[in-house]
Amino acid sequence: MVKLRLTRTGRRKLVTFRLVACDSRSPRDGRFIEVLGNYNPRTTADKKLTFDKDRVEYWIGKGAQPTLIVWNLLRKHGINKKNTADTKRKLSGAAA
């Protein structure tokens, strides 16, 4: 199963994270499929999360499961369960 999760980058006490699509069996900072964005908790509110919205919606449409923290971050940027259901329908209709 593919998961959308945060991987830790940066150095000690100056942490940043990457938003990645990865296999659920891989470790937190292990192998990933694609980097989707960055999250820096130390910056101002409007610049904390930067991500490629199209690619995030694509992965969610393909059945990727975001972690709880990633869901909370994405909800603040307008991606919610209703939008993802619409994306899933679009992708399944395009494949059929």
Image (cartoon, rainbow, N blue to C red):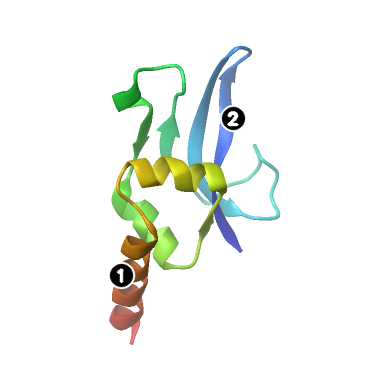
Query: Circle 1 sits on which residue?
Result: 86
Quadrant where the C terminus sits is: bottom left
> Quadrant of the rendered structure where residue 58 is?
bottom left
Q: Which residue is mark 2?
A: 8
Give the side of residue 42 with respect to residue 65, left or right: left
Q: Residues within 10 Å of mark 1 (few under 14, many from 20)?
A: few
Residue 72: x, y in percent?
46, 43
What residue lies at 56% left-to-right and 49% top-to-bottom?
67
- Mark 1 vs mark 2, CA separation in Å: 31 Å
Residue in front for this viewpoint, 77 or 62: 77
Q: Position of residue 45 (x, y in %)?
A: 34, 23
Q: Amino acid at mark 1?
A: Asp
Q: Residue at x 32, y 67 (%)?
A: 87
Residue at 51% across, 30% down: 17
- As drawn, the label of residue 18 is none
Q: Position of residue 86 (x, y in %)?
A: 30, 70
Element type at mark 2: strand
Q: Quadrant of the N terminus?
A: bottom right
